[in-house]
Image (tube, coloured by chain):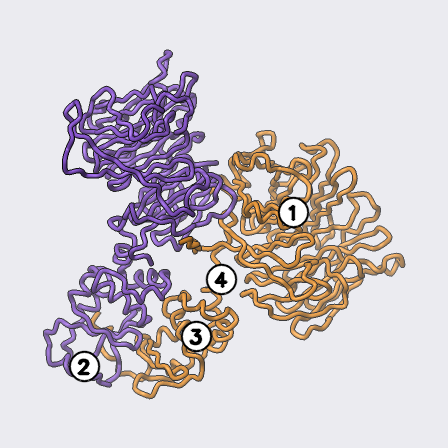
Amino acid sequence: MADEYSQPQSNHHQPNDRLRLNVGGKLFETTVATIRSGGPDSLLGALSNRLTYDQEPVFIDRDPEIFSVLLSLLRSNRLPSTASRFTKQELADEAVYYGIESHLKSAMSPPPFNGIDASIVNVIQPASDGFTSAFTAGDDGSIWIAHGGQISSYDWNLIHAGSIRTHLENITSIRRVYSEIAAVGSESAAGLHFYDFSNGRNIASIHWTDASDPRIYKAQVTAIADSSSTVFAAFDCPHNENSILAIDKTTLKIQSEFGRQRGSSAKNLVAGKLTWLPQTGVLVGSSVNCGAFGYSGYIRLWDPRSGDVVWDMNEPGSGRSGRFGDSFADVDVDTDELTMFKVCSKSGDLAMADLRNLSEDPWVYLQDKNPSLRNESRGGNSVIHCYRNQVFVGREGGLEVWTTLPNGKKGTEIENNNNGICEDLYRRNFVDKEEDSERGVIEKIEGGGDRLFVSRQNVEGIEVWESSNSSGPVSVL
Amino acid sequence: MPPFALSASSSSSPCGLQQNNKAESNIVTVDVGGQLFQTTKQTLSIAGPNSLFARVSEIPNSTTQFTAPFIDRDPELFSILLSLLRTGNLPSKAKAIDLQDLIFESQFYGIESLLVNSLSNPSQFEAFNLEKSKILSLNGRDSPSAIATTPFGSVHVVHGSKITSFDWSLRKKSTILTQFTAVDSLLAISPSVAAAGATDFSGLQILDLESGFVRETLNWENVTRSSSTVQAIGSSPECLFASFESGRRNSNSIMVYDLQTLYPITEIGHSEIYGAELDSAIPATKLNWVSGSNLLMASGSHSGPSGVLGNIKFWDIRSGNVVWELKEKIDCFSDVTVSDSLSTIFKVGVNSGEVFFADLRNIGSENPWVCLGDGRKMASGKKEGIGCKIECHGNQVFCSKGGNIELWSEVPMRSIKSTGDGSEERIFRKNIMGKVKDMGGSRITNLAFGGNKMCVTRKGQQNVEIWQSSIRGF
């Protein structure tokens, strides 16, 4: 212990060396180690190499109050409550100045998203044309919203970072293929278009054409997915022919075409949802069509290298499906766990399939005995989204989450013997409250970072749901 | 890395000169974030041997050159914690600072227990001074079914299949998912461990509330080898009690476990039902430990065509015998509790809806109940007492009726009137808690006490009400 307090005489700094800073006229005293924890590239880190305690404190011409918040952050790795005196924007700007933005990011980010304990924290409202036509969420909790032909970007702090106007009138699919580049498509105008967010320019447009078939033109994009090297887009041509194009991410040129089909029956329609499975190198596409006789659609897995269909399922199928007539209303893939979930259109039941072990009827129907939810299963307007090993289902306006039990078996270990019904695997809970569900029918759910984004039909803005460690007590004195 | 260090400078501060003259001085100087603080070794020693302060005060200050130990933390927060060390209470200027900051800072210095003592001490509980102060809302749509508290005020709430835990300051929360579809009984063993059981799920689970993992599942091996559901959980300082019923509902028992090791110690009150004797078929649905007389009170009731029947038994754990049994045939309890400090049992009659008390000192008497209201309502068939809850805390009795809480307290009288049988007459009086605006509301489903607060849950409300006294309200 004693040597910690002995005085180092060498020229280079010991981490316990003290140093003084004069920020906007206020003196701060701290240690080199604290200042260096901001990282070697930060302004503070660079200063720590030049300062000694003896010399006059270095003067930094910035606001001392925000600095004291950021110094607390460096000392304790958490934001003090005095941070609430400043807007998120001010804190972020100041953190960028001192080069400690990553510290601020980790301190300000919400805790891991937990569907059983989440609440609505914010509604992102674009200034105009607030009805969202499509959106895509980033891994850091940022979001790009397509609305009225514009794309608005909100950063990890959900601060409006900028908007660009595209030539499209109505963007119906959007995908962030690079950190600054969006791929957009519209069901009312032809082609897949790449926009660079940094300068607002259209950098490429892809159209599906066929030299041997002049009828293939003006094809619209219905779904976009991307892998690390390729963008996949489902194109639909007005004369009932559709296909999937693979586009090279670096050259933005068409690589290959596969999955081409024609006709107007439900199993030949264009895919409305595409998901890339990085673990297996398979593209999952699905199409759902709702007509007078109920829902119909397909789920199909392609190997993009060969263009072959790996697995395929139509509903309503032949009699082989365990639940004939209860066709799926939506389907989503958990890319980490390699499982697929569908929600049935009539019964509203949720079913799970293991992507590593797909058979003719791979579905295991999940049941929950939660008495408060007993009469809540109905089909109809349902959307489903898998995120962080949880399954979120929007039924009309209600938002529910299916979570695996803590000591329960893994989904893949379940044997499909009990008539395809499984009880003690997932627990179903409502995420929202009764009054939340009255705001409108849920259109799309997507997770990004530690947030869940929810858009509703004919409602302006996008809801942001987060978990919190703070109990948020309300005083009623 | 040690968070404090000596200055590498030779700059002398004015107070440093005085310090040098008194090598054996009791005064300790600390430099926190550039600001100098002086205090005594005695004050710092209050923080305990494991805290950072103990290490600071050990540093010899008889070095030739004055150097105050440097702690790289916020000086403003330190000054408040120093006041806490000096006086045991937070200074009023602490009100300008968020409690969460102080908690975090006290954890850094290793003195969170002092902060807990000053803000959420059970001795600060003042029944007459409680007012509805906070609402803690729960996410999702499930209403709370059970609630458990620790002595220093952590609160665990079960809603649906989830348990949400609030820390002693009620500022932080965490939620876990359980294997139960609904939890009917919950008991907090520590701020992070709870025992949970349900009337439709086999086994008593010991849950880690931070990770959500089941540490242990305790089961009762019944003769029919069917599942064993949990009807009630209770505890004494050493033991954990669980009332089990077999899944076929034809046998029941109370298991006693060691609270530390969770090994079963003994089994009491095992009963199998063969004939028509209904009384033995009633499992205990409430377990209260009476530490004054080392007895376990187990109570249960059954609603049948002839009305509500019940029994209250006092068990001697060591011998496994019933010391006293009260059969409840007329105006059976809808809820019953026992107060150690008053050595009295209290119940709410299911028919009358009135509060009764029975003195534990005349153990063994035939009809010990004294009605604290209109005794004529005992025979009424109205069942006014259904859903009422009664709990004791300190010297007071809290009884919920609908959406209101009655606070019963004993008035110590100087002149003692003797009743016919020679025992002294005791006087209890009631008050309705809360301001006019707090009264009414949905029916109260749970009452729990911890630290200086009372927690209340209501039917159909996805939140917990916190009632606190406001003397040193933060």
Q: Is residue A402 left or right of residue B155?
A: right
The span from disc 4 to disc 1 (Cα, nearest Å) is 27 Å
- Residue A165's tag is none
| B111 or A367: nearer the viewer | B111
The span from disc 2 to disc 3 (Cα, nearest Å) is 32 Å
Mark 3: give few (<14), some (14-19) or many (20+) Cα within 10 Å. Answer: some
Q: Considering the numbered disc 2 on the image, is that residue within a helix, a strand or a loop?
A: helix
The span from disc 1 to disc 3 (Cα, nearest Å) is 43 Å
* Mark 2 vs mark 3: in front: 3
Query: Residue B210: horizontal and vertical position, in percent?
Result: 39, 49
Which chain is tinted orange?
A
Q: Considering the numbered disc 1 on the image, is that residue within a helix, a strand or a loop?
A: strand
Q: Amino acid at mark 3?
A: Ile
Query: Residue A433: horizontal and vertical position, in percent?
Result: 54, 46
| A396 or A295: nearer the viewer | A396
- Residue B16's tag is 2
Which residue is rendered at x = 10% and y = 74% of the image? B24
> On the image, numbered disc 1 is attached to which residue?
A383
Which residue is rendered at x = 30% and y = 49% of the image? B129
Q: Amino acid at mark 2?
A: Gly
